[in-house]
Image: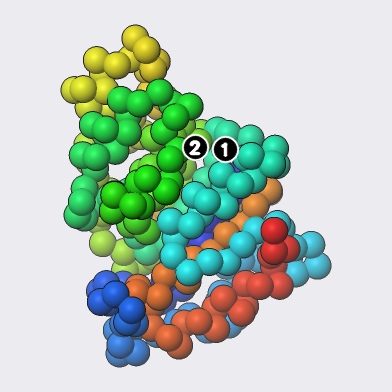
C-alpha cells in the first residue's frame, strides 16, 4: 500500500524560516506557486484526479499524519508497512532540535508493538511536525520512503539515519542491545528527488496534506483549496 504525504510549503518559491508559535512567515519570504503549476504537479506527476478523489485528510500540522495513519490501520484500511511519498520542503526526520536521540535511544528500545504512544510523546514534547516521519519509521510503519524536495530545500537529512547505500537504517548502541527481544530494525529503501520534475508516481490508497502555517505565508492557504477536490475526506 502507498500514501501520498504532502506539505503546503512544498508549493512555495522559497523555504521560509520557521515563524514563532501562532504566527505566519511574512509574505515577503516566498510566493505560492500558481494554480496551473500546482494542478499540473498533482495530476501529471502524482496521478491524482478530481473525477476520482482519493481518501485522505487535510490538517494543520504535519505530525497529525501519524494520527490519520493510525486510525486507518486500526480500521483495517491501511496495512503496515506501507510506502510513503513525502512531498515537502523539509524531511521531517528530526534534523533540528530536539534531534534524533530520543527516537534512536528511547523509542527503539521498546517492543515494536508498544511504540506508537502518540499522546505520551506529545505530552513529553518529543513529537512534533519536524520529526513525525522519524517516529513513523521507528514504529516500523514504513516500507519505503521517497522524499520529493522543493528546489530551495536545505540539506536536512540526518546522516546517522543512513547506511552506506543511502537507505534508512535506524539504530543506536542501546537499540542494538535490544535486538534479541525486538528484532533487527528494517532497512528502508530511501529515494530523494532534488529535482521534483524527475518525480512521477501514482497509485495511492490515501492522500494527506499539512497546512504547516508556521512554514508558509497566509497567501499559500489557497493551495489547500486547490487540493480539496482530489481528496475524499475520511
SS at mark 2 in the image: strand
Task: Report the number of discs.
Answer: 2
Q: Which mark is residue 142?
A: 2
Residue 209: which quarter of the image?
Answer: bottom right
User: Is residue 166 toward the left or the right of residue 147 in the image?
Assistant: left
Give the x, y percent position of residue 216. 38, 77
In percent of the image, x 39 and y 50: which residue is there?
Answer: 132
Q: Nearer the viewer, residue 228 or 190?
A: 228
Question: Is residue 215 visible in the rendered structure shown here?
Answer: yes
Image quarter where the N terminus lies is top right
Q: Is residue 234 above or below residue 180?
A: below
In percent of the image, x 43 and y 26: which residue is there?
Answer: 112
Q: Which mark is residue 82?
A: 1
Q: Is residue 108 above or below residue 153?
A: above
C-beta proximity under 8 Å, tags 2 and 1: yes
Q: Nearer the viewer, residue 194 or 32?
A: 32
Colour style of the rendered protein structure: rainbow
Question: Is residue 148 visible in the rendered structure shown here?
Answer: no
Give the x, y percent position of residue 158. 24, 45
In percent of the image, x 61 and y 47: which residue is there?
Answer: 71
In percent of the image, x 20 and y 51: which residue is there?
Answer: 98
Amino acid at each position: 500500500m502507498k500514501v501520498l504525504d504532502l506539505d503546503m510549503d512544498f508549493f512555495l518559491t522559497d523555504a521560509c524560516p520557521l515563524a514563532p508559535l501562532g504566527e505566519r512567515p511574512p509574505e515577503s519570504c516566498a510566493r505560492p506557486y500558481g494554480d496551473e503549476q500546482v494542478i499540473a504537479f498533482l495530476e501529471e506527476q502524482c496521478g491524482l484526479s478530481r473525477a476520482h478523489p482519493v481518501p485522505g485528510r487535510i490538517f494543520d500540522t504535519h505530525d497529525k499524519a501519524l494520527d490519520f495513519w493510525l486510525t486507518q490501520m486500526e480500521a483495517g484500511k491501511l496495512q503496515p508497512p506501507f510506502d510513503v511519498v513525502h512531498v515537502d520542503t523539509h524531511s521531517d526526520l528530526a534534523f533540528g532540535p530536539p534531534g534524533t536521540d530520543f527516537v534512536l535511544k528511547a523509542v527503539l528500545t521498546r517492543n515494536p508493538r508498544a511504540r506508537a504512544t502518540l499522546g505520551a510523546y506529545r505530552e513529553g514534547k518529543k513529537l512534533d511536525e519536524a520529526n513525525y516521519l522519524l517516529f513513523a519509521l521507528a514504529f516500523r510503519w514504513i516500507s519505503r520512503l521517497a522524499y520529493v524536495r522543493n528546489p530551495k530545500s536545505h540539506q536536512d537529512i540526518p546522516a546517522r539515519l543512513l547506511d552506506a547505500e543511502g537507505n534508512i537504517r535506524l539504530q543506536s548502541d542501546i537499540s542494538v542491545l535490544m535486538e534479541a527481544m525486538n528484532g533487527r530494525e528494517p532497512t528502508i529503501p530511501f529515494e530523494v528527488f532534488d529535482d521534483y520534475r524527475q518525480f512521477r508516481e501514482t497509485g495511492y490508497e490515501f492522500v494527506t496534506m499539512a497546512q504547516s502555517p508556521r512554514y508558509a505565508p497566509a497567501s499559500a492557504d489557497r493551495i489547500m483549496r486547490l487540493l480539496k477536490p482530489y481528496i475524499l475526506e475520511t
